[in-house]
Structure formats: C-alpha cells, structure tokens
Image: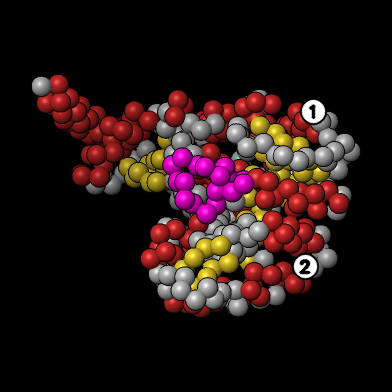
Amino acid sequence: MVNVLTRIAKKLTRWLGLPFALLVTAMLKILVPGRKVRIVVMDPRYFGHQCLEPEVFWNDWQSAKESGSRDVWLCCLGKKSAAANSYLWEHTREMFPTVPSWIVTRLAPWLEKLKFSNVVLMEASIYRLNFLTERASTLPPSSTFTARRTEILSNLNSPERPYVVFTIREPDVSYDPVDPRNRDINDFVSSMQALTRRGFNVIRLTSKTKYPLTSTGRHILDWQVLVDGRDADELALISGAAFVVSSTTGGDCLALAYRRPVLYIDSARLYLVFLGTELTTFQIPHLLDSRSDQKLGLSEILARNLGWTGEVQSFTDTGVTIVNSGTSEIEKAVSEYAELLSHERGAEMRAGQGNWRQQFLARYHRDVMARHGEIRAQMLPSSVTEFRC
C-alpha cells in the first residue's frame, strides 16, 4: 500500500510541474523576448566536476557573448548538501548566476517532452579544455591563500623551495576496487625523494587516508585536509604548486582549473585523459597481450578498439593485460617530466607528439572533436618510444 501511494505521489508531483513549466517559459518570453535561456546543470557530487565544470561553463558563456549571442546563461549547482566540497559550491554560487535545483527538477521532464524553444537544459562538461591557457581561471587567485600556504609549508625544511603535489587514488576505492588507477602511495616515495634531490619540496595531498606515507623526510609532507587542515587547503596548495603528479583523483582537475601542469601516471585509457589541454602530460603503463605477454604498441591497441573506452573490462575482453609501472619506472617518469618542464629537454617533449595524435584521430576524430576539441595533451616522450608511436 505504501509503495502504491508513493508512486501516486510522484506522478502527482510530476504533473503539478506542468503548469509551473508553462508559467516559467511564458514569463521568460515576456522578460527576455527573442532570447534563449540556457541552464547548465552541474554535478556537485564529484570534486573534479566541481573544479572544471564552472571553468567550461564560463568559457562557453563568454565565447557565446563574443560571437554576438544574446542568450541568457544560468547554472544549476545541485544541492549544497550533496557537494563534495562546500567551499567550491559557495564560490561558484557567488561567481555565476544560478537557478535552484528544485526549479530545474520540476522543469526538466516537461522541457524534454514539450520542446520549449526558449529554454534549453544542458549538461555541464569537464572536457573541451582547449581554452584553459587562454582564459583566466574563475577560482580565487593563488594570492588569496598566501598566508595559509605559508603556514602549511612551514612544516617543511626550506619552505621557500618550489613544491610538487602528489594526488594519488587510494588502493581500495570501494566504488571501483579493480581500477588500475588505485595505487599504493608508497610506490611513489622514491619519486618524491628524487624530486627533493632536484631542489623541490613534495606534498602528498589527500582529504583523508588510511594509508599514510611510511617514509617522508625533511622535504616531504603528508597532508590530510580533513585531519591536518581546514576548508580550501586543497586550493591553497595546488594553486601554488610547480606541477602535480596524479593517478586521477579530482585533485588533478583542480590543478587544471588553476592552470597548473599535471603528469598522469599509468594512463591506460586515453578516453579518460584530458586531451584538450597542453597542461596534460600522460605516461602509458605496460599493455601486454594476455596470451604471449608481448608488449603492445599504439597501433595494436587501436586495432582492438581500446583507444576510446573507459572500461577496464574492455581490455580483459580483448586479451590485453594492464601492468602498472613499478616504483623505479614511476621515478624515471617523474624525473623525466621535471626535466621537460625545466626546459632541459623541451624539444624532446614536442618530438613525436604528432605521430600518436594522427593515429588516434584517424580512428576517433569525430569522437575526440566532440568531447575534447583539438588534441593538445602530450604523451611523455619515453612513452612515445615504448608505445611505438
């Protein structure tokens, strides 16, 4: 009986949304005649989305204005209670014109059914990042956090050193336990130590972890925001970083939103790489034929249609084993990237990028253009060689 009443209540609520939708669209025709109202719906549940969706929204809105469009742009942030980061939710609300989520919830079913011409609901995107280095960030400037950043860095010897942030997924992520991006942070310790020998400080940044670093030292800091810090520490630290090393955690998205360069370790699935920005550099893990254990190159991966999949199971199904880099290989990759950023090997970074991009676009051009736009991301030169691009 309770289930029946619940279904009836849901249907009644939905039908009551019809006169509301008609009223809203009629009022908009009067208030903004001849103009479309575009409502971009964002997803507050994921930290990475909270970082990049406002950036893409701002660029799309400004690009439309620059092209002469008179459309009205609004965003829906979802409920604050569902937000991964309340500081970012509040900041976005202060920055942009917003629509409460309850209004969008009532409008959505009828906008889709009745196809109103003057109101368009759009899903936010964390991709299409070609603009990142050409348009300023909408996040609070790095200078906003100078005092807090200085306070945190005082936990290190030589706090004046430039620093690198490591943001690595936990090894036992409950919602995706077999994802190869889940890593033991201690696999990265030798990389951190190598960076300290190059004159950097290193910060391992996470919200909270059951897996603290087993070895730190005078120039390495293990910082848990929910344990050691306070709201917005992620912004304070990442906005001032020389670069970020990531296995894709959401912190990498904050780095991109702050226009900080990111090295992605063991990016087997190019579908998940932020291909649209030159701030992205990615390294490829070993991809082996499951029967012969032979290393596979890019052409062989593309032949198995694995260039445009987000699912690990797709690799298993096509006879490919993903073998993540070992400790020494990660250290070599991180050291290589540090050299590239210091312009010691800048020409080498540019060499070979055209080959893998051409091969990739030859197979997935339409998909890439729709999701990312022009490919500007760079494959680490050692991966270009190993992946036979």
For residue 169: magenta? yes
Query: Residue at horizontal 81%, vertical 59%?
Result: 342
Looking at the rendered image, the quarter that the N terminus falls into is top left
Identify the residue at image location x=42%, y=64%: 316
| Residue located at (71% from left, 44% from top) | 165
Element at label 2: helix
Image position of 128 with respect to 145: above or below: below
Q: Amino acid at mark 1?
A: Glu
Residue 74: assigned label: none
Residue 235 appears in view: no
Bounds of the magenta span?
168-184
Which residue is denoted by mark 2 in the rendering? 346
- The percent coordinates of residue 263 (x first, y second) are 66, 56
Badge 1 local density, few (<14 within 10 Å), some, or many (20+)?
few
Task: Answer left or right for 65 relative to 262.
Answer: left
Q: Earlier in the sequence, mark 1 or mark 2?
A: 1
Residue in front for this viewpoint, 28 or 314: 314
Label 2 environment density (alpha carbons within 10 Å; few <14, some 14–19, many ≥20): few
Q: Tag 2: residue type? A: Gly
Q: Inspect this view and state whether residue 389 appears.
A: yes
Identify the residue under disc 1: 151
Q: Secondary structure at mark 1?
A: helix
**Could you say where residue 194 lies in the image, as x and y percent from the top left?**
80, 53
* Quarter occupied by residue 112: top left
